[in-house]
Image (spheres, helix red, strand yellow):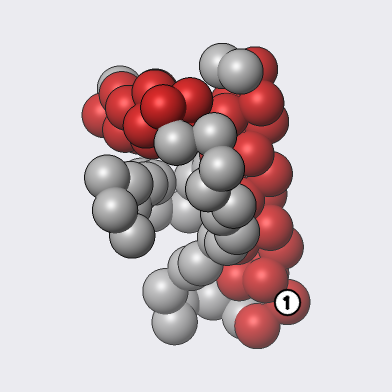
């Protein structure tokens, strides 16, 4: 989607650090330049773990990304 990059998390984590932080910062910079663009933030997990656990992990990941994007303006 344009200049946006996929955000990857370590296994079983929703922590934002290292490369994850850099990617979100880059995405925030792009979105600032393209203020008219609407996005949808989704979180995903692989097939390991139970369905409910993976849904919750995906939600935590999406919220972490959303919160950082909002904090970056």
Of residues 33 and 20, which is closer to you in this image? 33
Q: Secondary structure at mark 1?
A: helix
Q: Residue at x 65, y 83 (%)?
A: 51
Question: Counting other residues with Cα less than 10 Å from the Cα at mark 1, is it few (<14), some (14-19), or many (20 or more)?
Answer: few
Residue 71 image-quadrant placement = top right
Of residues 30 and 11, which is closer to you in this image? 30
Above or below 9: residue 24? above
Question: In the picture, which quadrant includes the N terminus?
Answer: bottom left
Of residues 48 and 42, which is closer to you in this image? 42
Question: In the picture, which quadrant includes the C terminus?
Answer: top right
* Residue 12 shown left or right of residue 51 in the figure: left
Q: Residue at x 48, y 68 (%)?
A: 45
Inspect this view and state whether residue 5 appears: no
Q: Position of residue 61 (x, y in %)?
A: 58, 49
Above or below 4: residue 46? below
Q: Residue at x 73, y 77 (%)?
A: 52
Numbered disc total? 1
* Residue 7 shown left or right of residue 73 in the figure: left
* Residue 38 shown left or right of residue 46 in the figure: right
Q: Residue at x 54, y 34 (%)?
A: 35
Q: Residue furthest front?
A: 36
Of residues 47 and 31, which is closer to you in this image? 31
Inspect this view and state whether residue 14 appears: yes
Q: Residue furthest top?
A: 72
Q: Which residue is mark 1?
A: 52
Above or below 64: residue 12? below
Q: Position of residue 65 (x, y in %)?
A: 56, 39
Q: Position of residue 48 (x, y in %)?
A: 45, 77
């Amino acid at each position: 989607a344009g200049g946006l990059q996929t955000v990857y998390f370590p296994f079983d984590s929703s922590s934002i650090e290292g490369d994850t932080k850099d990617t979100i910062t880059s995405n925030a910079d792009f979105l600032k330049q393209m203020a008219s663009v609407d996005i949808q933030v989704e979180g995903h997990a692989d097939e390991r773990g139970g369905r409910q656990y993976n849904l919750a992990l995906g939600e935590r990941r999406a919220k972490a990304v959303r919160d950082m994007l909002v904090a970056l303006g």
